[in-house]
Amino acid sequence: MNPRFLTEDAKGLLALLRKLKSNPDKELRILLLGLDNAGKTTLLKQLASEDVSHITPTQGFNIKSVQSSGFRLNVWDIGGQRKIRPYWKNYFDNTDLLIYVIDSADRKRHEETGVELQELLEEEKLAGVPVLVFANKQDLVNACSASEIAESLNLNSIRDRQWQIQACSALSGEGVKDGIEWVIKTCNSKKK
């Protein structure tokens, strides 16, 4: 496209895009996945400092850009309903980090979530991509601990990438900051 024919608004947008592209090390593409009702959208809204009191199930995807420690985190929250999961693979390209959210209190679905996580770890386009597992809903009395979940998912067998499990409550925000600090530290060392 010839810049002489762009409007002032388009030139401004083009300049902004060039600026963003000129500093790619400070921008991260994060894929936020997990089963439906795990708390992905609540977590995303918590990261964006938005109201978490009214959340509806994600039918497609949500995208938010969040600033953290000098990084722009472009977070893609993809719905986790069974009928949507086959489309997850359409979002794998150029992923810097995978955040996988688990409902720690939904013990009946831990096997199902383990199968889905294992399939993600075997995806060629996600090879070597670091994984943060948020053991969400720790505010509930019947929640499994992060260490119980790590053991049931056999996370200690992961050898082809960096990984971390973080207990959290997306609703209260507890543990979320610690997880994001790990994301920044991990991606910062990976980019060097």
Image (cartoon, rainbow, N blue to C red):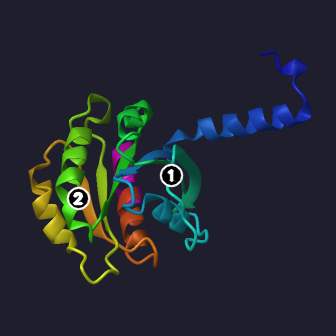
Which residue is nearer to you in this view: 171 or 22?
Answer: 171
In depth, the one of 49 and 188 nearer the eye is 49
* Res 165 → quadrant: bottom left
Identify the disc placed on residue 58. 1
**SS label for mark 2:** helix
- Distance from Cα at disc 1 to Cα at disc 2: 19 Å
Q: Magenta segment, principal secondary structure?
A: helix
Quadrant assignment for the C terminus: top left
Q: Which residue is mark 2?
A: 109
68 shown above or below 15: below
| Residue 192 appears in the picture as rendered | no
Q: Is residue 184 above or below residue 191?
A: below
Amino acid type at circle 1 is: Thr
Residue drawn at x 26%, y 67% is: 106
The residue located at (34%, 73%) in the rendering is 137
Is the residue 186 above or below the residue 144 in the image?
Answer: above
Can residue 149 be seen here?
yes
Question: Where are the magenta residues, as a range?
Answer: 184-192
Q: Quadrant of residue 21?
A: top right
Q: Residues within 10 Å of mark 1 (few under 14, many from 20)?
A: some
164 left or right, relative to 155: right
Residue type (three-letter) at the residue carrying disc 2 = Arg
